[in-house]
Amino acid sequence: MKEQSIFDTHSLREIYDEIRQVYLQDDRPWIIGYSGGKDSTTALQLIWYALSELPAKEKAKPVYVISSDTLVETPVIVNHIDETLTKINTVAREKGLPFYVEKVKPIVTETFWVNLIGRGYPTPQRMFRWCTDRMKIRPADRFILEKVSKHGEVVIVLGVRKSESMTRAQVISLHEIKGSVLSRHSKFSGAFVYTPIKDFSLDDVWSYILQTPSPWGSNNRDLLALYQSANAGECPLVVDESTPSCGNSRFGCWVCTVVNQDKTMEGLIDSGYTWMEPLLEVRNFLASTQDPNTKRLYREYKRRNGYIGFNRNGNGTLVPGPYKFEFCVEVLRRVLVAQMKVRKNGPDPNLTLINPEELYEIRRLWRTERGDWADTLPKIYQEVTGTTLPWIKDDLGCFGAGEATLLEKICNKKGIPPMLLIKLLTAEIAAQGMSHRSSIYPKIDQILHEEWRTEEEILRKANAMVGKEG
């Protein structure tokens, strides 16, 4: 059954009139989520054309166009978005329009690589989608809260449609305000949501952007070609947990393992972007670690807090924790190798898959939380890239690979886990110079209460307890 067209009941003039009416009814600035895809492009074009007809004195309210950059977006999509944002900013200034472009990014401690390589977070999956909150929701939230703090209230404009899915339709309807085209934001009392294309069908979207020239000078047929090459849909700006992720082969992160198969990347490679093959190889390597039969080869038996947990199915197996340090080292090496390959074979010799700020933070985590006295990261970087970075000398500089080897030898002789001593010594160094030394005692207590038995010892005792109960 064909979807009903919005243009069967509303003219384009009426749609523009509604947008102008909503814009002029108050002083709340607008924040438009722009992902570079067909839906957000349609919403932005509609608003652009509608506001263009207003007198100059009535275009005083700012319209912030924000785009989410997770730092692991598919490079081809990033290029498309960056070029578009530059055009929007330039043309808006030339024509005196109130559009202001902003890119929102995760802070360095919350990026994909810092969490996966630095902390050992396992690759995201449907039941543990830690990436969405850290890399999409929080950056957008920080921007929204900043504007709410400055202006009191804001209106967030989203290019979402009811016809995308039943779930999307229910979410849109759930927060609607009776007698208004605005909805309440699911999280912030000072934010409202406007969805100008909620009643558009898929055909309406393509019909509009292919028949209406881009007001900022882009070629919308290039966008159509990009969709055809990638064989995918777009990844929306995510503002809360109700917004769908970029699964189901949508434009999104090139490292995404929430989907079983990355058809977007495969489609782009098949259509000529062969230089992205190293990215697909890294992504597939990460996805392989989700195999239940092999995941224990890559994962610790303890959680990051040092405790253990058993599966609820009663089979006496432990819930796997973060990636092992050795595996994180392997992932870093693969990412750096892939970065060198795409710089050599791709169109951008400076393309970055993992930036220096992330490398600095990963190194810090490895040194302070993973017991990496050998300071592995700078060595790997030198080996793969043939260059170096201005590494910061930290307080653990007094310990190196030699000290780690000696400590391990002594601990093995005494039957003490080496990591226990490494954590205690690291905590002591971190507390040096503090005016109140008492703060170290809770840390020592926490370390001593972690699980320090081997996996074999834990399982042996657990099995023995099960035998007694039987």
Image (cartoon, grey):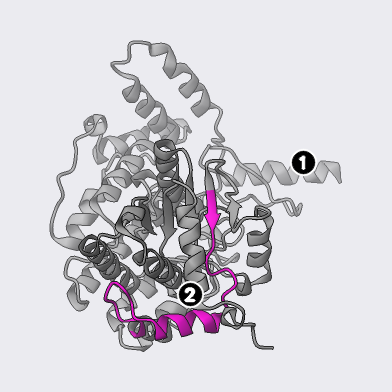
- Camera sees residue 295: yes
Residue 257 visible in the snapshot: no
For label 1, count other residues whose C-alpha is less than 10 Å away and answer few (under 14), some (14-19) or many (20+).
few
Estimate the x, y position of residue 191 in percent, counting from the top left: 52, 46
Horizontal arrangement in the rendering, residue 344 relative to residue 142 (left or right): left
**Residue that badge 1 annotates:** 465
Range covered by the magenta-colored residues: 192-221
Q: Quadrant of residue 432?
A: top left
Q: CA distance from mark 2 to mark 1?
A: 74 Å
Q: Secondary structure at mark 2?
A: helix
User: Where's residue 263, x and y in %?
Assistant: 47, 80
Q: Amino acid at mark 2?
A: Arg
Q: Is residue 212 magenta?
A: yes
Q: Pointer 2: residues within 10 angstroms few (<14), some, or many (20+)?
A: few
Q: Residue at horizontal 24%, vertical 66%? A: 91
Picture residue at 37% right of the left edge, 39% below the top: 371
Q: Is residue 60 left or right of residue 341?
A: right
Q: Residue 339 lies in what quarter of the image?
A: bottom left
Amino acid carrying mark 1 in the image? Met
- Using residue 44 as the reference point, say whether residue 243 is left or right of it: right
Above or below, 154 against 330 in this view is above
Pointers 2 and 1 in contact (CB under 8 A)?
Answer: no
Of mark 2 and mark 1, the one earlier in the sequence is: 2
